[in-house]
Image: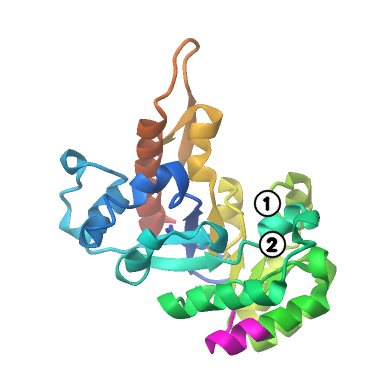
């Protein structure tokens, strides 16, 4: 899902930002994204309202007319998602590389050519337009990443979204901008120290992308403060799911999202919390689209 947010006044130029809510369409939270696999035509009401049952459906025709924006990992794709990707979602597919970036040993015995072929087959089957390369530099090295990227793009007939990591250097970033109309920066998930240091360089990355008329995506970045400061074209995050993990509710306060901790001695109902938090993020989405 994307939350469109305009760039701060005076920052580069006015432009909406797309925030993909990631990680919610698999596992225990799948009920948020669909009612059941037999009724994809009803997905719009379910997705935008964050509901899962008939009595909780949204009544707004305007909401029903909108698509939601979803990012999912290749590692977690399920068959029930297939009819939603073109009919109800603006969809972005991640390669699943983060699993191997966080633990390189997991990639030691993988046939990467076979992995890319399976990845490409799914992209072709579902006619997916936005998908990331396998940015597994720390596992196989940049030269191999480039080889796999070429194989992926030859198999799909489409350009992937290359992902810049600091080991590639700024000259490689400029090379990416010359050859692609959508690029990403990565390496920030689960590394807050690196993210804080890296944020200082965001203006340069955004400026050079703007000068090249290239869209820029920040993987795993949804710092509320940062979103108002750094006008990326799109970002993604699983932050909207943190309530279930951290024991709190999100509340839209009219301008941003606050965290409400559960009182001592009380327990949150996981399913209801997920639905509530989804709704609050949608409120923020609508506010941001109009006001930011």
Label for residue 189? 1
Point 55% across, 78% down: residue: 120
Q: Position of residue 59 (x, y in %)?
A: 15, 49
Give the crowd class for mark 1: few <14, some 14-19, many >=20 residues within 10 Å: some
Q: Position of residue 175 (x, y in %)?
A: 74, 84
Horizontal relation, residue 227 to residue 42: left or right: right
Point 41% across, 54% down: residue: 288
- Establish if 29 lies above or below 164: above
Residue 7 visible to the viewer: yes
Label for residue 97? none
Horizontal relation, residue 224 to residue 82: left or right: right
**In the image, farthest residue toward the top:** 265
The quarter in which the C terminus is drawn is: bottom left
Does 153 appear in magenta?
yes
Q: Secondary structure at mark 1?
A: loop
Q: Position of residue 105 (x, y in %)?
A: 80, 55
Say if mark 1 contacts mark 2, CB within 8 Å. Answer: yes
Depth check: 138 or 227 in front? Answer: 138
Part of the protein shown in magenta: 151-160
Q: Which residue is mark 2?
A: 186
Point 44% across, 14% down: residue: 266
- Establish if 245 lies above or below 135: above
Q: Secondary structure at mark 2?
A: loop
Displayed quadrant of residue 56: top left
The quarter in which the N terminus is drawn is: bottom left
- Establish if 35 lies above or below 275: below
């Amino acid at each position: 899902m994307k939350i469109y947010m305009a760039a701060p006044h005076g920052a580069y130029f006015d432009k909406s930002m797309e925030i993909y809510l990631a990680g919610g369409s698999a596992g225990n939270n799948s009920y948020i994204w669909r009612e059941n696999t037999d009724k994809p035509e009803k997905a719009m009401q379910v997705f935008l309202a964050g509901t899962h049952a008939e009595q909780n459906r949204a009544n707004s025709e305007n909401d029903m007319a909108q698509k939601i924006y979803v990012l999912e990992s290749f590692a977690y794709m399920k068959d029930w998602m297939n009819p939603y990707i073109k009919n109800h979602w603006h969809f972005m597919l991640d390669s699943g590389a983060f699993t191997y970036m966080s633990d390189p040993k997991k990639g030691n015995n993988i046939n990467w050519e076979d992995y890319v072929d399976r990845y490409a087959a799914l992209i072709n089957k579902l006619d997916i337009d936005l998908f990331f390369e396998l940015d597994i530099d720390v596992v196989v090295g940049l030269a191999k990443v480039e080889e796999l990227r070429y194989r992926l793009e030859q198999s799909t007939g489409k350009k992937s979204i290359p992902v810049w990591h600091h080991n590639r250097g700024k000259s490689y970033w400029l090379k990416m901008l010359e050859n692609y109309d959508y690029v990403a920066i990565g390496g920030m998930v689960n590394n807050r120290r690196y993210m804080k240091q890296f944020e200082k360089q965001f203006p340069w990355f955004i400026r050079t992308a703007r000068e090249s008329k290239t869209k820029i995506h920040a993987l795993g970045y949804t710092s509320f403060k940062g979103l108002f400061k750094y006008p990326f074209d799109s970002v993604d995050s699983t932050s909207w799911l943190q309530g279930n993990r951290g024991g709190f509710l999100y509340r839209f306060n009219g301008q941003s999202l606050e965290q409400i901790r559960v009182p001592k001695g009380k327990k949150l109902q996981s399913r209801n919390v997920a639905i509530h938090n989804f709704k609050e993020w949608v409120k923020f989405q609508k506010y941001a689209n109009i006001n930011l």
